Image: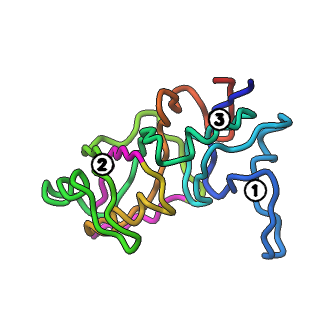
């Protein structure tokens, strides 16, 4: 069984081929990983960064990707504005989205992540609007869920980095690099 951890850069698809019809080739996993037989266990949107687990084990893939298993996933989220205790409590209790109420999340305000790499292009900076980092842990994985949750409490996501999935984390893994789990 092969399982690898990959730090997916911003603007990279969570698949090995680009089936888009944009006419220009977009970055995919194959631009970074040349290891046959492994596939992403779950997805990370093109505009999100961070930990992606790839494996050739179908059971492990299902355990990671299926929300039924409630595997915790922690995200470092740069949000617009400074969430107050009411906004954080709403995330902790679950928020109502168009596709239903989310499970309760764990959330804390945090300093900017240590050794944070620059994003290309950088997040838009506005002098008149402060921003803040939060660590948000969820146990489900709906489409663009974290972005929709922070927007629902009035703090749109500016940058989203998945830090951990279960016991695996990004520590020591530079963007675009991978290692065996």
Q: Is residue 162 above or below residue 96?
A: above
Does residue 39 appear left or right of residue 173 in this picture? right
Q: Which of these two is toward me, 115 or 40?
A: 40
Identify residue for label 1.
27
Number of marks in the rendered image: 3
Which of pointers 2 and 1 lies earlier in the amino acid sequence?
Answer: 1
Identify residue for label 3.
59
Magenta part of the chain:
122-139
Q: Residues within 10 Å of mark 2 (few under 14, many from 20)?
A: many
x and y, in percent, of residue 152 in the image = 30, 69
What residue is at 17 percent from the left and 54 percent from the top? 89
Q: Is residue 69 above or below residue 83?
A: above
Q: Which of these two is toward me, 68 or 160?
A: 68
Identify residue for label 2.
105
Q: Nearer the viewer, mark 2 or mark 1?
A: 2
Does residue 67 appear left or right of residue 54 in this picture? left
Q: Secondary structure at mark 3?
A: helix
Does residue 46 appear left or right of residue 111 in this picture? right
Tell me where residue 36 sits by quadrant: top right
Q: Residues within 10 Å of mark 1 (few under 14, many from 20)?
A: some
Q: Secondary structure at mark 1?
A: loop
Quarter containing the N terminus: top right
Magenta stretch contains residue 124: yes
Which of pointers 1 and 3 lies earlier in the amino acid sequence?
Answer: 1
> How far apart are the two marked residues, 1 and 3, measured between alpha carbons?
28 Å
Whether label 1 touches label 3, CB < 8 Å: no
Magenta stretch contains residue 138: yes
What residue is at 45 percent from the left and 38 percent from the top? 71
Does residue 16 appear left or right of residue 139 in this picture? right
> How far apart are the two marked residues, 3 and 2, measured between alpha carbons?
26 Å
Q: Which of these two is toward me, 10 or 5?
A: 5
């Amino acid at each position: 069984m092969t399982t690898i951890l990959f730090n997916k850069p911003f603007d990279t698809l969570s698949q090995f081929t680009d089936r888009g019809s944009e006419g220009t080739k977009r970055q995919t996993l194959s631009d970074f990983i040349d290891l046959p037989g492994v596939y992403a266990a779950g997805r990370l949107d093109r505009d999100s960064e961070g930990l992606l687990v790839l494996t050739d084990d179908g059971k492990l893939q299902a355990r990671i990707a299926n929300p039924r298993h409630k595997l915790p996933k922690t995200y470092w989220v740069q949000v617009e504005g400074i969430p107050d205790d009411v906004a954080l409590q709403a995330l902790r209790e679950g928020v109502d989205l168009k596709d239903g109420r989310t499970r309760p999340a764990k959330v804390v305000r945090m300093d900017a992540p240590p050794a944070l790499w620059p994003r290309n292009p950088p997040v838009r900076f506005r002098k008149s609007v402060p921003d803040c980092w939060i660590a948000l842990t969820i146990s489900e994985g709906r489409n663009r869920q974290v972005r929709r949750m922070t927007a629902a409490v009035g703090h749109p996501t500016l940058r989203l980095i998945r830090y951990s999935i279960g016991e695996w984390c990004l520590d020591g893994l530079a963007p675009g690099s991978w290692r065996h789990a």
